[in-house]
Image (cartoon, rainbow, N blue to C red):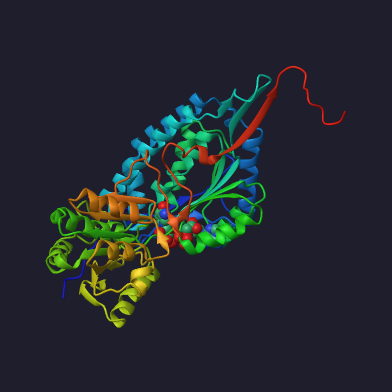
Amino acid sequence: MNAPLNISMPAEASKAPKAYKLLIDGKHVDARDGRTIARNSPGHGFTVSRYAQAGEAEVEAAMQAAHKAFETGPWPRTKAAERAAILLKTADLIEAQLEDIARLDALESGKPIAQARGEIGGAIDIWRYAASLARTLHGESYANLGDAMLGVVLREPISVVSIITPWNFPFLIVSQKLPFALAAGCTAVVKPSEMTSASTFVLGDILMQAGLPAGVVNILAGLGADVGGPMVSHPLVEMVSFTGSTRVGKMTMASAAQSLKKVSMELGGKNGQIVFPDADLEAAADAAVFGGFFNAGECCNAGSRLIVHEAIADDFLATVKALTAMVTVGDPLDDRTKVGAMISADHLTKVAGYVAVAAKDGSNVYCGGGQLASNAGQYLDPTIIRGVTEDMAIAREEVFGPVLSVLTFGSIEKALHIANNTPYGLSAGVWSASIDTCMSVARGVRSGTVWVNTFMEGFPELPFGGYKQSGIGRELGKRAVEDYTEEKTIQFHRGQRTGWWVG
Ligand code: NAD
């Protein structure tokens, strides 16, 4: 029996929670009915933030502000160079506040502070990348339509975008959407998760400080049904950019379809890492632990299925287990922590339930498996489950916790079958020294990203998104700004038009 985790209380615990107001039309406002949402730090248990809680009236006000800013404000008409300058200034201001923002995300989500710093660093890079795309966004021209005709295809901002984000990477995910929408000249209403809204409010302040005109970005904290729902169905919105669960994504798409809004969907994953005997097994074992337990497994890209060749399974898993025992679980604010707290007690119960069902279904818990005792907060022991078969829920459903399911294979065909045997298709990893093996897996896996002899790296230059029920569309990459545009075809005719229709 391990000693209980000893979580120290940070300075914030003895202060009043930080209060955040909604950002509507450039002003910080309370909800009309005065309601607020309190957020407890999942790693420590005290109330860290309190946000004004939006409802339908605030959605309406935010939509009107975004619409006005689009129709009559300067932003869509501003030169790309000036838009890019504001995005770059935003990146600089985020950089100046990196430590504070990382701390907010760590306190509200329970993620390790060192990791949170990395995420804010990644977000800064994305804001700068989006600034470069703002300046290269362009349409097409066709001078090959006959001497009298010139075809021009413009890219215009799509107008008001609803941006809805989840709790697991609060600052990073809004930064995968908003800078590109802004680069295109759109205006936006943004709803972060009701559990991790603080850093998005800080971003709102930074944008105002960087010189973004009022109403271009409006930020609402609130519940999915009260705020997210009306943000999706609202008639003034032309596009919904959603990251979250496949379940809510499907509801969102169904609602958006009623008025034929464009949707971008980044949803769940059930990703496999496939390990062949000829791989660098030391590196693969480290990546298996990283893939399974990074962000406490609360990660769309988690390598939650370890698909190992039978010939090496016992030895390889012994190494993975030994590395798992070395993973530091505990206080999110401790620089040494690799696995922090679970987002909520309910979520912890759900994840533990998956482990219990898997054990009942005949698999065996190879290490971990339960809640860790602690003086504060909620923590799960990194868990490896062996003897998982493809039909088990733990092999098919997104568990979203620090739980690694192990399946084995004897042939490349079987490995691919296992990897593809899920409704999801977000990402996958393959470990082998053979280029033939790597290429066969990379080509054969149906997922939006495949990592070859590495895992879960990310670059703004590379498109990211899912096959199958992991999503629709791609974020990042050179076309990320285009996603927030409409194409307009203009046909210019020169001289007198000939070829009358009548007469
Ligand atoms: P969630 O679907 O419960 O919530 C996501 C957002 O949608 C939240 O802001 C929530 O308030 C809002 N929402 C809830 N109900 C709504 C409704 N009826 N209408 C509109 N909005 C509503 O997801 P979560 O639990 O916050 O996040 C975890 C999920 O997100 C996991 O499934 C994970 O895989 C996924 N995710 C995907 C990616 C990706 O890039 N593919 C990245 C991160 C997380």
Q: Residue at x 41, y 61 (%)?
A: 424
Q: Position of residue 178 (x, y in %)?
A: 48, 42
Q: Residue at x 54, y 56 (%)?
A: 53
Q: Of all residues shown, which one is farthest toward the right? A: 503
Q: Residue at x 34, y 43 (%)?
A: 120
* Residue 141 shown left or right of residue 275 in the figure: right
Q: Position of residue 179 (x, y in %)?
A: 46, 38
Q: Of all residues shown, which one is farthest toward the top? A: 495
* Residue 362 shown left or right of residue 140 in the figure: left
Who is closer to the viewer here, 360 or 293?
Answer: 360
Q: Is residue 348 visible?
A: no
Quadrant occupied by the N terminus: bottom left
Q: Is residue 228 above or below residue 364?
A: above
Q: Position of residue 254 (x, y in %)?
A: 59, 60
Who is closer to the viewer here, 324 or 428?
Answer: 428
Who is closer to the viewer here, 139 or 457?
Answer: 139
Instruction: Determine the image quadrant of residue 155.
Output: top right
Q: Residue at x 26, y 61 (%)?
A: 412
